[in-house]
Image (tube, grey):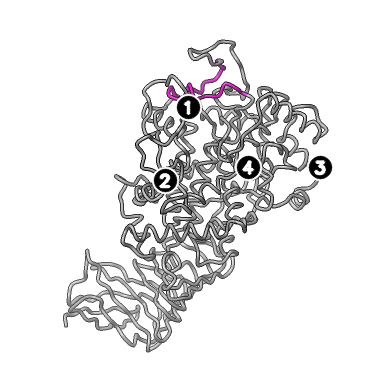
Amino acid sequence: MPSSAGKQSPAPLTERAVNRRGFLKTSLGATAGVVAAPTLATWLAATDAKAATTAAAAFVDDYTTNVLTNLTPETNAVVRILGGMAEVWKTGDAWNTGTPIRPEVLRANMRHCARITAARTERQAKEAFIYDRQHQSYAMIAGLGPLADLYRAGAKAVTSITVAPDTTPATTISDAVPADAPAGSALGAGSYDSALGQVAKLVDTVRGPYASGNPGKYAFQYPRPWRMNEDSEVVDTGAKDALGYPVYDSEVVVATQLLRQRSTSPVDDAGFPSGHTNAFHLASLALAYAVPERFQELVTRALELSDTRITAGMHSPVDVLSGRVMATALAAATLADPQYAALKAAARAQAAAYFQQQTGTTADTLYAYAHSADVRTDPYADRAANSRALTPRLTYILTRHGRSRDLTVPKGAEVLLETRLPYLDAAQRREVLRTTALPSGYVLLDGFEQWGRLNLFAAADGYGAFDSDVTVTLNAADGGFGAADTWRNDISGRGGLVKRGSGSLTLTGANSHTGGTVVEGGTLTAGSAGALGHGDVRVQGGTLRAATATRVRGSYTQASGATLDVTLRAGHSPALTVDRRVLLDDESVLSIRLDASRPPASGTTVPVIAAPSLRGRFGRITVQAEGFRAVPVHTAGGLSVRLTRR
């Protein structure tokens, strides 16, 4: 069915069909029914790409054009950013007369649907039913993990769709407030008159009147997979099924539980873009703004729930991809709109205060609580598993073509990371989005402004490259992510990192940036052997913590008052291996921790720094283990310590 995300109430079918065709004929000077997709190709062909980009308004400045009276790329910002479909599909003069432009893409699209629905289990069919019928904003709440039940209670959010029938229901089914629900309960994200009312309002605002997938559906008229065959043709066999629906020559099988939920009006029931997918991602990004402690998990859940649209047989990969693309742009546009600045700030503050009060945490400890469950109670507790699951869903059946092109991050997109990376400025958040983006060459993702290339899961893990020097300041007093964060990506690039402020930053990737690393304040933790990349490392203030055996592919310098914090293990390699020389100020500090699982025994000599050359010495050495002290042992190959009891 057409998406309800934007809450648009379309005109009656006959009036709408006449208006659509009349509008297109008048506005485009074309025959009736020639709609937006081929027009976009014509539009781009009529001028060079740069001029076309310059001529069109940025999506975030034009998103309110996404209404049913606007069905061309010139008039509708959503149709414009989904224009990659123009390279794949040409809309015909009726809902069932379109033709493939790149049949290999659409053939792979249909084969994927047929394969998935043929292998679908009964459990998956029932799950697909629940997420088809349940309010999409409510479905997203589970992405909050240990905070989900607290959210439902605080927001008074309820649903009537919790189980699926074994067979096809006798009637259509819609979500509703259960009769036994507490007073004031509401569907979706919850009630505005609740402890999380501002959060619920933010979700609904992001899913507002300009967030519908319906204009795109009418513009592109790409049918749902169960109405199409492998060659992307609609073949009505003339037969009727047991429910009275037309039978199409398609190998895509809709889940039994959803057969009655299908639309009976094909012209009003196009598949591209997927409205449910759009709604899942809109709700996901609104919740992620208010509760950034679960940012990646919410993004993962949105992609997982969107995949159930394919499992259900109701949508194809190209439908789902387009739903994600438009939702990403629409969420950014709403969050970047100045009229909603107070609302989004209030929602974030309300969520933080509510969850801290309910869990007895602080801004600094709420993240740990939000990740305190294991996979038995939180399906998204394993970050690595999340990454493995979502990666193929970012591109599905698409294959790359051509040389990679750098991404110009769409205007306003940086707002999506505003609460997740609050210590970075707007330009830095844009750089994070650029350096973590998907490569170019995926036809449906390379549309106008290339919103489809944004990889928000990866962006939540910080920079993907330092293409110039990056200075980052985290302050302990700011709390939350502003006080401490972890960058997990493998960071490349010719630039370097300068860490400032009293807060803490941890690097865990296999980093290869060549511009070096400087610590001026707070704590920089090397959480992997290659965390410090290539180049010199200078600790001018604050602390460098080597949480594991770490390599410096250059020289290492430590200034007066600065601290090297290492963890020593029995029989382990040096805490710090330096490729070139080490220079220590005589007033520098070495802080030693003993690994709890494999502590070195008293009386043993343990390597701390291995280097071809070492000058200077630590002015002070402390051991963070009661009853131990360390005596430095300088050798030609660096520095060791002899651990003894006091």
Q: Quadrant of residue 46?
A: top right
CA separation, marks 1 and 3? 40 Å
CA separation, marks 4 and 2? 37 Å
Q: Earlier in the sequence, mark 3 or mark 2?
A: 3
The crowd level at tag 4 (other Cα within 10 Å; few <14, some 14-19, many 20+) is: few
Task: Determine the residue located farthest toward the top in the rendered image.
Answer: 239
The residue stretch that appears in magenta: 247-266
Q: Earlier in the sequence, mark 3 or mark 4?
A: 3
Q: Earlier in the sequence, mark 1 or mark 3?
A: 3
| Mark 1 lies on residue | 115
Which amino acid type is shown beneath numbered disc 4? Answer: His
The crowd level at tag 1 (other Cα within 10 Å; few <14, some 14-19, many 20+) is: some
CA separation, marks 1 and 2? 30 Å
Residue 257 lies in the magenta-colored region: yes
| Mark 2 lies on residue | 141
Q: Quadrant of residue 179?
A: top left
| Mark 4 lies on residue | 401
| Mark 3 lies on residue | 46
- Of residues 148 and 387, the one drawn nearer to the viewer in this rendering: 148
Which amino acid type is shown beneath numbered disc 1? Answer: Arg
Q: Residue at horizontal 47%, vertical 27%? A: 115
